[in-house]
Image (tube, helix red, strand yellow):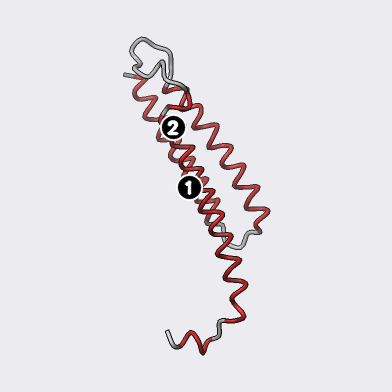
Amino acid sequence: MLLDLGKALSFFTCIVVVYHAAIHTLFVPGAQWEEGLALALLKLALAACVCFLSGMVFTWPTSTNPDRGVALSATLPVRFFFWSSAVIVVLLLSSWYFSDLVQQAAPFISSRSMQRF
């Protein structure tokens, strides 16, 4: 009973920390990319710690735990972290690419060409 509540609470904490890392990685207005990258890596490292601790709760060695023999990398919180960090990295790289593309195309976009649309 308490183990199930601990699993739910630890997984909810895992979701909140990964959400916090994703929001502050992708939506920091006016930050330089060096600062953003350092902050993103720190927040993802914190999320990794929380998710791996939550995975340890999922594999707690008790007789009533059905997941006690599962590898740590196969637990739900750790898989959630792996998938979400991959998505965060893809979104971060694509946002850097598109922001650079917009900055390069800005001199060629005039108000007269935008009025046609």
Q: Residues within 10 Å of mark 2 (few under 14, many from 20)?
A: many
| Residue positioned 39% across, 11% down in the render | 62
Q: Residue furthest top?
A: 63
In depth, the one of 13 and 75 nearer the eye is 75
- Would you say 39 lies left or right of 17 here? right
In the picture shown, does residue 109 fall above or below 74?
below
Residue carrying label 1: 87
Q: Which quadrant does the C terminus fall into? A: bottom left
The circle on residue 110 is none
The residue tagged with tag 2: helix, strand or loop? Answer: helix
Disc 2 to disc 1: CB gap under 8 Å: no
Amino acid type indicated by mark 2: Pro
| Residue positioned 47% across, 31% down in the render | 78
- Would you say 76 lies left or right of 45 here? left
Residue 103 drawn at (x, y percent): 61, 71
- Would you say 82 lies left or right of 45 here? left
| Residue positioned 55% across, 85% down in the render | 110
Q: Which quadrant does the N terminus fall into? A: top left
In the picture shown, does residue 23 fall above or below 84?
below
Q: Residue furthest bottom?
A: 112
The circle on residue 77 is 2
The residue tagged with tag 1: helix, strand or loop? Answer: helix
| Residue positioned 38% across, 26% down in the render | 7
Residue 35 drawn at (x, y percent): 66, 53
Number of numbered tags placed on the structure image: 2
